[in-house]
Amino acid sequence: MQSIRLTQEEAQRRLVRPQDRVSCNLAFIDCKLPGSHLKQNYSFIGPGVTQSSEQVVNIPEKHGFNIGAAAMPKGVTNNLHLHFTAEVFLIQEGSWRFRWGANGEHETEFSAPAILSIPTWIFRGFTNVSPQETNGMVFTVLGGDNTGGIIWHPSILRAAQEYGLYLSRDNMMVDTSNGTPPPAAADLMPALSSEVLASLRDYSVEEMAQRGVTAEQRQWSSDALLDNILPGHGAELAPVIGYGISQDRNSAPPIVNPHGFSVEWLRIKENHQVGRHSCPDVQVLMVFSGTLEVTFNREGEEVTLVAEEGAILSVPGGCWRQYRALEGEMTATLTTQGDQRKRLYWDLAIIDQAEQHDRCQDPDGYVAIASLLPATARRAAAKLLYREA
């Protein structure tokens, strides 16, 4: 694995702070419909499924997934549509009612902080139902570099045309209010027939509940990382979707169908840290609470930045990094490219210190009590660590 060194400028470029967000209120064809016209769409990593050429993308570099967000005042709705690739909701603020089914006949609610994965090829929509008057924020992770766009429910296509909005076959919005003529019928995105709607897979409320993880349902592990035993370290992980970076052999994600990425929670106590390590796969941290200090590169070449609550940080594969929580406990989600279980490589100083506390990695990459391993297992694990790091 080739090590990637980040300059301060490059590290800063990969950080999207709350003040760096640029919204678009004309991102989708339902943007003028009553009850939906106050939506604000964001594209932080990749364009996502925006249907507007005016959408600003903070980090256009390909990650294998896209990350965006919707900001919606209480009572505002995102209407029924379907995706071809995974769509995962990371609820940062407020309470949200999700609807799904051929005509949105099923519904359930999730409140922050929660994560929900809605299956592909079913219609879904959501509404901010927070009890307080708030402009709630929900982040989304979308599978693939090219999501293929979305398909809107036939009722939404019809309603949008009453406001002069049309959808072309290349999935871009055409606004005729500025004098642009409507596309010819042959150039319009066709609406799905009633037969196709009836053929779509139906998910019950009980089935969808299995695809969501609330704050109370998180299963935190304090044995998820090799350096947890060291003084001043001790981060925790709670897997949600797919096999992430956890080195706890007893951790199991509740959602395991392929998404193209994994999602897990990371929690670090104030002034505690995760020691220097590297991962071959690109990762994105989204800070939900607290403040995270991130230091890149090896000793002597270190660059440091601070990611505050609401910030999004892209970390390239092969880059050495270490984390510290500042000003209280820090919680973040960690999205990592790929469906496979991810492998971490630790700095040799971390490996040596862990061994002094009778901890090491076994040949399968999981944390183990060093004194329990036979010499053959210790040699196999060391060879794996040192060859790749």
Image: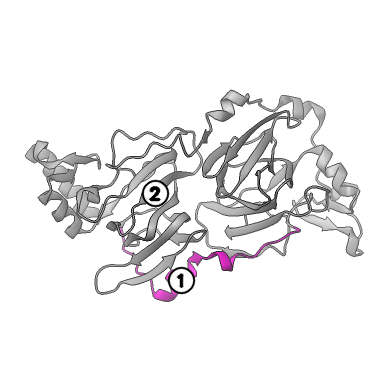
Do the numbered discs 1 and 2 sit on residues whose CB atoms are within 8 Å? no
Magenta residue check for 7: yes
- Mark 1 crowd level (few <14, some 14–19, many ≥20, 10 Å Cα): some
Residue 344 in the image: above or below residue 314 = above
- Split into 4 quadrants, where in the image is the C terminus? bottom left
Q: Which residues are magenta?
A: 1-26
**Rendered location of residue 244, percent (x, y):** 39, 44
Q: Amino acid at mark 1?
A: Gln
- What colour scheme does the image use? one colour
Dot label at residue 266: 2
**Rendered location of residue 201, percent (x, y):** 66, 26
Dot label at residue 237: none
Q: Amino acid at mark 2?
A: Leu
Magenta residue check for 144: no
Please give the name of the residue rendered at 68% of the width and 48% of the height, measured from the top-left corner. 149
Q: Left or right: where does residue 342 sit relative to residue 389?
A: right
Distance (Cα) linking label 1 and label 2: 21 Å
- Dot 1 or dot 2, earlier in sequence: 1
- Split into 4 quadrants, where in the image is the N terminus? bottom left
Quarter assignment of residue 175 = bottom right
> Which residue in the structure is indicated by mark 1?
12
Q: Left or right: where does residue 44 sit relative to residue 180?
A: left
**Rendered location of residue 79, percent (x, y):** 75, 42
The one nearer the camera, 180 or 245, is 245
Label 1 sits on a secondary structure element that is: helix
